Amino acid sequence: MTSVKEGEAGPHYLGCVTSTSAIDRLSEEHGLLLGALAGLEELALRCMDKQPLDAERAAALVGLISEFGCGLHHAIEDELLFPLLEHHGVTRECGAIGVLTYEHEAFEEALSRLNTAMGEASEGDPWACRTWARQVDALSHISRGHMCKEEGVLFPFAQKALSGAEQEELFERMCELEEKRHRGLRERVVVQVPRHLKALGIAKIPPLERIGCPGDPRKCPKGGQHSTCSQGS
């Protein structure tokens, strides 16, 4: 099974779209979303360094995450994967599926708050930029925690619980949903996310754990090379 890990921020790592395994395909989509998140996190770190927000790039990355994450990835899980797993004993109410569905909703709400904050931040106000950066951190926290649950628990369970025939049917239904609602989206994301990361100087995708600057240069994803780390050291 494919798993998300730190890797080169290139089209091959980000966009492995040749898998014919339903669960592997969902994991690969996490790689694409992590790439887009890495771009937002870099922009947020720059805002915390009192640099102006690149509003155009931020809007593009948020748009990709919204369309690909909420529009496609979450739809596949909510409409196809989760109902199938319920037949294999995974509970919805007060169970894993209920938690993951709630996190999908929280993800959409965090995206909405991020878009709201971007309106003022795009005008160059330093405080508004820092507020926007904090909203990126909130989105990242929700996203990474959610992906960790799926990569560490749900996806391995699905690989074992679903028969070969069930996984084949699931993959076919995923392809049908994508073709009807989001034709060409995956290919567009595969091309655009690496371009944004290259423009931002990001050579590697951060690991799945939540990242952010804790004020400790030893833990900082930028190697302690920005203001919040220097203040905390």
Image (spheres, helix red, strand yellow):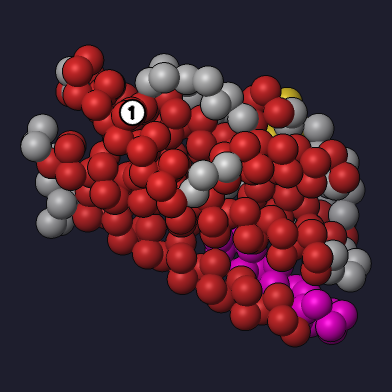
Residue under the point 66% across and 79% down:
117
> Where in the figure is residue 106, as x and y percent of width and height?
41, 65
**Disc 1 crowd, CA 10 A, few/some/many (<14, 14-19, 20+):** many
**Residue 131 visible in image:** no
Decide if residue 156 is on the left or right side of residue 14.
left
**Residue 41 visible in image:** yes
28 shown above or below 179? above
Q: Circle 1 is placed at which residue position?
A: 171
Decide if residue 8 is on the left or right side of residue 85.
right
> Where in the figure is residue 218, as x and y percent of width and height?
75, 40
- Looking at the rendered structure, the secondary structure element under dot 1 is helix
Amino acid type, residue under disc 1 in the picture = Phe
Specify the segment rendered in magenta. 121-140
Q: Quick one: 229 or 171, which is closer to the camera?
A: 171
218 shown above or below 46? above
Residue under the point 15% across and 52% down:
92
Name the chief secondary structure element in magenta. Answer: helix
Quarter holding residue 60: bottom right
